[in-house]
Image (cartoon, helix red, strand yellow):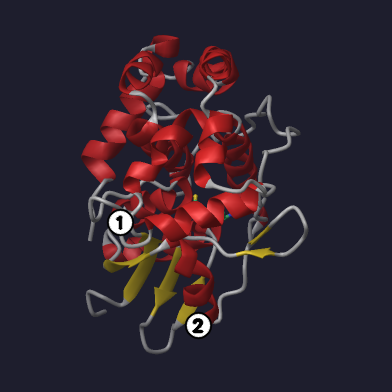
Amino acid sequence: MASSALVFYDMATHPQHTPYAPNPSKTRYALNFTNAPYRTEWVDIPDIHAVRTALGCPASRKFIDGSDFHTLPMLQDTTPGTECVLGDSFDIACYLASRAAAWGGAALFPADSTRHGLDYSSPHIDDPTGGPPLSAREAATPDLADYARFNTHVDATFTAYVTLTSQNMARAFPPTSAARIKALFAQRAGVPSWDDLMGFLGDAEKHKSTFRAFETGIGGLASLYAQKEGPFLEGQTPSYADLVVGGWLRLFSQFMEQDEWAEFCTWHGGVFGGLHDVLQRQYWEIQ
Ligand SMILES: N[C@@H](CCC(=O)N[C@@H](CS)C(=O)NCC(=O)O)C(=O)O
């Protein structure tokens, strides 16, 4: 296979190539984890719709009004005979898992897993997200249903606290598209401008109480990690479940206030700080 046969579509950032978005980050971890040969194509947020449509990739998420929400990641396999385009991080994980052995990579869904912690229930699973509803992907095969469910519950938990990252997110917008991204986000939120949106999210008291609630909100997931010896959900053996959590940790590590991120890393025996460090060291590479 030629080294660029897999094309991974991630969000363009400033500075260049400092990815942060949680679902693409799950995929980046999974690509590196499985030793997949890939290259990254960087897409500006307002261009996602056009890029996805040009590749014939249907939206995998909806806005509240039911209209299509075109998102990243996308993965395009250009290998003759197996050409395809996948537009959801969980589908991509399943695809990579089925090829990992051929690349000499690790198993995303280890056959001998005890599946410890995959029955995690988010305290926020029924919360409104304040934006587009989460998209729950069904596993293609019944044996992966608990990973798909875990993904949905982890998404629900971190989404409940995502406003802790919103204030700093704009610094990652590429200068050439920042104005368009801000206008798009304001339009989606139904407010006149980005500054209005930030004004609403910037309430210091609300921020503080959200941060305090985060420690409790993340406690159930943390306790599942704490039950095993080692940085991963299963203890010593990583799986896609850890990469799901890691995708979110990547976002929070980038955009939480530095002192809050430092404190977050000490909560619950430091399980998430430890997981983030090991995932970044071992599986974070930009190709
Ligand atoms: N279920 C989808 C969700 C993808 C998703 O929501 N991606 C976000 C980034 S984490 C996105 O592309 N947002 C684009 C936007 O906000 O315009 C998946 O797992 O791939």
Do callouts 1 and 2 mark residues in contact (Cβ within 8 Å)?
no
Q: Tell me where residue 28 sits by quadrant.
A: bottom left
Query: Residue at the location (58% across, 36% down)?
Result: 159
Mark 1 residue's CB less than 8 Å from ligand 1: no
Element on which disc 2 rests: helix
Q: The C terminus appears in which quarter of the rendering?
A: bottom left
Q: Tell me where residue 247 sits by quadrant.
A: top left
**Amino acid at dot 2:** Ala
Q: Nearer the viewer, residue 114 or 187?
A: 187
Element on which disc 1 rests: loop
**Amino acid at dot 1:** Pro
Q: Tell me where residue 81 sits by quadrant.
A: bottom left
| 213 left or right, relative to 17 | right
Query: Residue at the location (27% across, 30% down)?
Result: 277
- Percent position of residue 63, x then y: 70, 56
What whole-number distance in Å separates the C-alpha atoms at marks 1 and 2? 25 Å
On residue 85, which mark appears?
Answer: none
Query: Residue at the location (42% across, 56% down)?
Result: 179
> Above or below — where is 256 with respect to 107?
above
Residue 162 visible somewhere in the drawing: no
> Above or below — where is 6 with respect to 255?
below
On residue 54, which mark appears?
Answer: 2
Residue at the far bottom in the pictured view: 80
- Percent position of residue 188, x then y: 63, 53
Sequence-wise, which precedes: disc 1 or disc 2? 2
Q: The N terminus appears in which quarter of the rendering?
A: bottom left
| 117 left or right, relative to 79 | right
- Percent position of residue 244, x then y: 47, 42
> Above or below — where is 265 with respect to 188?
above
Label 1 belongs to which residue?
175
Residue 271 visible somewhere in the drawing: yes
